[in-house]
Image (spheres, rainbow, N blue to C red):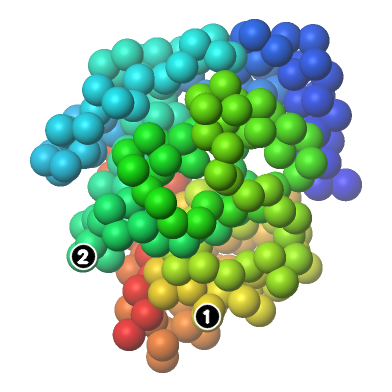
Amino acid sequence: MTQWEKMLNNIEREYENHPRDFLRQPTIARAVHPNISNLAKAYYKKASTDQWLKDHTRKLKDPKLGNPVRQANEMSLITVQSMYYIYLMIQHFGMNPITENLNVTDIGGGYGNMARIFRTLGSAGDYDIIDFPVMHKIQKDYLNHCKIDDVNFKSLEEDNLEGDLLIATFSMNEMPLEDRKIIENKIEGYDKIFIGHNRQFDGIDNVEYFRALKKRLEEKYEITRFQCDLMGIHRYFIGVKK
């Protein structure tokens, strides 16, 4: 049994018992809404160096649902972390995935916050979230509260993996190898790849895994791998098709 399989029962119970402040519950907070104030401020400072993101900050204030922990300019760590991810995408893709309306596959969509941000900032591309049914329930409720009803919720199957941009922030790296293989089989259908990962999970060496994935893809993609300068245990794998 994987760590996620063990956590899902707790997540389901916490959400059912605490629908108004689910983001403050221990397992949910650990999994999708951590509380690290200094990191939130660092993400916000870095992301705000992009003028487009800075100009749109006011739109991104977290809704009250779930009772999020607001840490930087009235935004949660997860919101400013998502801003930082978008900042990195703009820097490495040479374009803005939101204003260009890229079709997105978001693997492991948390509680739906990245989808909220894409839609709030005007993205009209398809947005698919690949996740567990328990997480889809939370995401649907959260996005409905935000009056967003055009996000698609799908399971991890090859037929569900298609689009322009693959986002997998601290999700693919927490999968068993057999589940990662499903993504590997379809990854070359995406023009752009944005993956965040840690060093290891459930005994899998993620540094070596993503090094091997880079070697496999580098004939068709420009791949950049680097350690986050704001959170040293985090690493990024960013690909752009040649």
Residue position marked by numbered label 2 in the rendering: 94
Please state which amino acid type lies under the numbered disc 1.
Answer: Glu
Give the image quarter of residue 13: top right
Badge 2 density bin: few <14, some 14–19, many ≥20, Cα 10 Å: few
In front of the other: 189 or 35:
189
In percent of width and height, residue 77 lies at 41, 25
- Residue at image point 37% right, 80% down: 241
- Residue at image point 40% right, 51% down: 124
Instruction: State the quadrant of the C terminus.
Output: bottom left
Badge 1 density bin: few <14, some 14–19, many ≥20, Cα 10 Å: some
Please state which amino acid type lies under the numbered disc 2.
Answer: Gly
Residue position marked by numbered label 1 in the rendering: 188
Question: Taking 102 as reference, is 22 left or right?
Answer: right
Instruction: Identify the secondary structure beneath mark 2.
Output: loop
Question: Taking 194 as reference, is 50 left or right?
Answer: left
Residue 93 in view (yes/no): yes
First reached walking from the N terminus: tag 1 or tag 2: 2
In percent of width and height, residue 7 lies at 78, 32
Question: Taking 45 as reference, is 203 left or right?
Answer: right
In front of the other: 181 or 210:
181
- Residue at image point 70% right, 23% down: 27
